[in-house]
Structures are given as C-alpha cells and as structure tokens.
Amino acid sequence: MPSIQTQFIKFHETIKLVNLDENRVLKQKRDLLLDKLRKGLKQRFKGERVPTFEHRNQGSYRMGTGIKPTGGRDYDIDVALLFNVDPQQLGPVQVKQWVHEILGAHPHEAEIKRPCVTVQYTEGGEDAYHVDFAVYASPADGRRVPLLAKGFPGSSTDKKFWEPSDFEGLIAAIDGRFDDADDRQQYRRVIRYLKRWKDTSFPASGEGAPKGIGLTCAAYLWFQPHSSIDKLSQKRTDDDLGALKELVGHMLSNFQETTAGPRLRTPLPAAPHDDPFNRMSDKQMQVFKKKLDAFHDALVSAASRRNVVEACRDLRPHLGDDFPIPDSKAIAAAAAAGPAVRSTGHYA
C-alpha cells in the first residue's frame, strides 16, 4: 500500500470549512438576521407579549465536519431558534410563519420548508449562501428535549406537528464518539472526505444525493481509526486511506435487502432517532449504492498500488480535482534523497 497520507492531509486542508464562529463574514450575516428577527418580533407584537428566543449553532459547523461547497452549491449555515412558546397553544407552522414574514424581505428571500425556514442570500445574481433556521419550542414543563416545528402552511393537519428533536444530544454523540484526540481528528477528516465524494458524485440540483448527516451517522456507526506507532520515536502516523476504505466497505456490507432493493439505514443517535436516508426513493438508493460501490473499488485499487501517483489518480474521479496528484519526478527525487518525515495527521 502506498503512503498517500500527505496527499489526504493536503486535500483535507483544501476542502475543510472552519467553524462558524471563526468565519467572520458568515458569523456577521447570521447575527444580522438574528437581530432583524428580534426587532421584527417586537414590531409585530407591539402592545402584546413579545415572543423571545435563543439561538444555537447546529449542523456541520458545530460538529466540525463542514466542507467548502462545490459544483454550483452555496454555503449553508444551520441555526436553531429556541422559542419560549407553549406548543399546546401555538401550531408549529404559525411560529415558522413569523420567521418567514420577518426575514423574507430584500436583500434576501425566505422559504418555509418542512424542517426549517431557509433564508437565501445572493451575490451578483448567484446564490452565495443560505441560512437554515430550525424553529423549536424550548424545553419546558418537564420536557428535556426541544420540539421541532414540522410542516408547511398548506400541509394537512397530520403533517403539521411538533416533534421531539434533541439536536444538542446529536451533536454531543457525534462529537464524543472517540475520546482520543487524534482518533477524533481522523474521524472528522474521513467524514469530510465522504461529503466531498457525495458532492463530486451527485449533481447539485435534484434530490438524489444522500444527506450529509446520513453519511456522518454512517461514520458514527462504523468508522474505526487507522494508524501506526513507530516503536522508536512513538510517533503516530495516520492512514486515512485505510480508514476511509474500511468505512465505505462497512457501509456497503450494511445495506439491507428489501422487496424494493437494498437500503442503507443510519438512525440518528438522538431523538427523534429517525433515518436521514428514509426520504430517498428506492431508485435513488440503488444509485447511491452503485456509486458507493465504484468508490470502494477505487479505494481498494489505490490501496493496492505501489506507485503514489497511480493511487492518487484512482481517487481523483471520486474525490474531485482538489485531490492532489503529486509530480512523479518530485516523488522520484524524494525517494532518492531518502525517507521523508511522515505527517502525524494531527489536523483540525
């Protein structure tokens, strides 16, 4: 197996997205929207009791697994709005409509979706990024878990409901999967590789791509660290190729046969414990498996190569043009100069 850890680390540094609180522009835009929402609620409920809320970052920014968008996609930010409201007195769509009405004005647009309210920003006529505001009723009266507002304005009554959704528990479970810091960093890197594979393999438009949280849950279930320790120096050298290959293999082996074809299930490790892949059609699931099979074949091929350049060429069609292919002359020169110091893979 060739050592292409250096290439994986360079790839990771290229695709990773920093934490929202470290990204000045995105944090500023989020805070502007939150400020507009608070002011808008005061104006809307002038003379009445004004609903208040707290916000929490959620999604890949909180989990440290975000990647830069590619292929026509825009940046997305996930924010939880925890409203101090009584879910027995207010319907979930009613609260979402407050957010939609206040934030759906120039220079951005807002849209009510089943799990959230999406605010879209454009720059130069192109989608630049969007903020997904998940609307919750804060825990109260003995409830430990917030309730997520589900449904559209035109949905039937049975499609409008408050659903227990422990997003903080989900983040804690994903983030706390490994105690060892180096294992945890490799785990996050591999999740990012899977997400970039998804963006490379599936078009930006359409509903056929597997959800990123589903891939994250797959890593939560089946990822195992791969590394070696030098006996003399006691330095750790990570093997991201081996870890990624084994994870994809575990994913494929966990597809379950149904009457409509094979399906992969990755339930959330927190309430509501549903499966992020359950909205994929049987045909979409078949395409997902076919592309995952092809990715696994490329990983196996790369691992069997003796040449670093050939191994990287195996992976680029699946991970995209950001995956580096080293110059063969530089590789030969480095080999002639003697063994290089290997990266320990300790990256955020």
Image: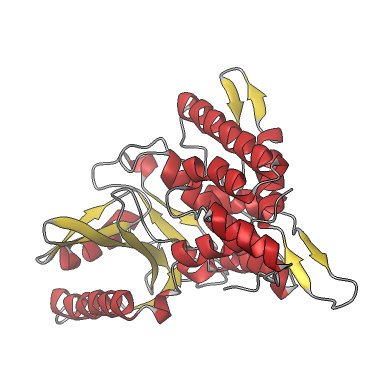
Q: Picture coordinates of residue 142 (x, y %)? A: 57, 71
State which quadrant residue 121 falls in: bottom left
In the picture provided, is 63 more to the left or to the right than 44? Answer: right
User: Which corner quadrant holds the C terminus?
Assistant: bottom right
Q: Residue at x 65, y 32 (%)?
A: 255
Q: Nearer the viewer, residue 346 or 28?
A: 346
Instruction: Write the residue at 72% across / 40% down.
Output: 304
Q: Residue 187, percent across and down?
A: 65, 61
Front-most of 331 and 303? 331
Q: Quadrant of residue 97?
A: bottom left
Relative image position of residue 331 (x, y in whole percent): 60, 58
Q: Is residue 335 left or right of residue 51?
A: right
Closer to the camera, 346 or 152? Answer: 346
At 73% across and 67% down in the image, what residue appears?
A: 338
For residue 135, side relative to residue 300 (left or right): left
Can the viewer see residue 116 in this picture?
yes
Residue at the far left in the pictured view: 106
Q: Is residue 183 left or right of residue 271?
A: right
Q: Where does the image place residue 171, in percent across and percent down from the top left?
A: 57, 66
Residue at position x 13%, y 78% in the image: 43
> Can the viewer see residue 187 in this picture?
no
